[in-house]
Amino acid sequence: MAAALAEFRALCDAQPDDWYAWYGAGQAARFLNDFHTASVYLSRAAELAPTQASVHLALGIADQLQGEFPSAVQAFGRAISLDADFAEAFNSLAITQRKMGQFDKALHNFNAGRQALACRLVKRMRNDVSTPIVQLGAPIGTKWIECATFGALWLASEAGAASVSWPTPESAIAEEDSGAHGGLFYIDRSLDDGFVRSFLPNYFATFRRWLQEEPIFAHLVGNEGTVWERLGQLELAEQCFTEARAFGDPTRGVTAWTK
């Protein structure tokens, strides 16, 4: 990182209008635990590239790590205003609010981060019969179901569906046995006043698989657990920790929860 910082500093001198040079220098300084220097470089990067959400996230993290919580909150807010699906920015905002003792706000934004992630995932879904069929497997918590349900409701709302329906345990088993709808995530059925979107087991199974590939989901759930722990709600905290462990390695990433 020290070598990277030296190279990025040289690039800043040679090309002072290159936002990525300042961003790289700031990130290198941050990982060297020089948070003040990181904020200086990242502030300049944000001036040069005000529409780059990732720059504002990085600046917010650098400010948070040196205890500059109000400015960190502002930076995360700018990142979210640029990218409403930026789950990582919601996570860092909620962590900062937890550090400020604003537990209600932190809980709200950990949930908002999962909803942002849900939107990000469903936007990439292509409802095609040839999509791979994923087996759901054993249950591993409830936060992922809430996340998947939010994504389904968002999809249905964007499509203008009059209502939605969910698979029952019996219909899910029958669908998995027969494979009648192939890899479809949902089917639309006409109504007198529009259509109903019926979600299939492959939607939930695929969504859960994707969450297992997104480290941020485990962080959002595990970090929520640390808030419940601070509030003395140990049963809720352990539920979060258990689900987070089921979805990913808690040591991955710079915003990893500590359980």
Image (cartoon, rainbow, N blue to C red):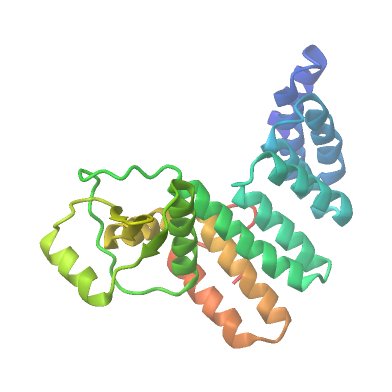
Q: Nearer the viewer, residue 170 or 31?
A: 170
Residue 96 appears in view: yes
Identify which residue, 202 or 93, lies in the foreground: 202
Q: Residue at x 79, y 32 (%)?
A: 46
Left or right of 17, for residue 250: left
Question: Which residue ends up furthest to the top in the rendered image?
Answer: 14
**Depth check, front residue: 219 or 124:** 124
Spot the residue most to the front: 192
Residue 55 occupies which quadrant of the picture? top right
Write the residue at 49% across / 61% down: 150
Q: Position of residue 118 (x, y in %)?
A: 50, 54
Residue lying furthest left: 178
For the image, the number of numbered tags is: 0
Residue found 52% across the figure and 80% down from its top: 239
Instruction: Locate residue 134, reporting x and y percent.
Output: 26, 57
> Eyeballing the image, is 2 above or below 179?
above
- Counting from the top left corner in percent of width and height, residue 30 is at 75, 43
Would residue 248 be visible to someone looking at this image?
no
* Image coordinates for residue 128, horizontal then vertical, percent: 26, 43
Vertical side of 73 occupied by 257: above or below:
below
Q: Is residue 172 left or right of residue 71?
A: left
Which image quadrant: the N terminus? top right
Rendered image quadrant of residue 232: bottom right
Judge left or right: residue 11 versus residue 151. Answer: right
Q: Toward which corner of the image does residue 237 lie, by quadrant?
A: bottom right
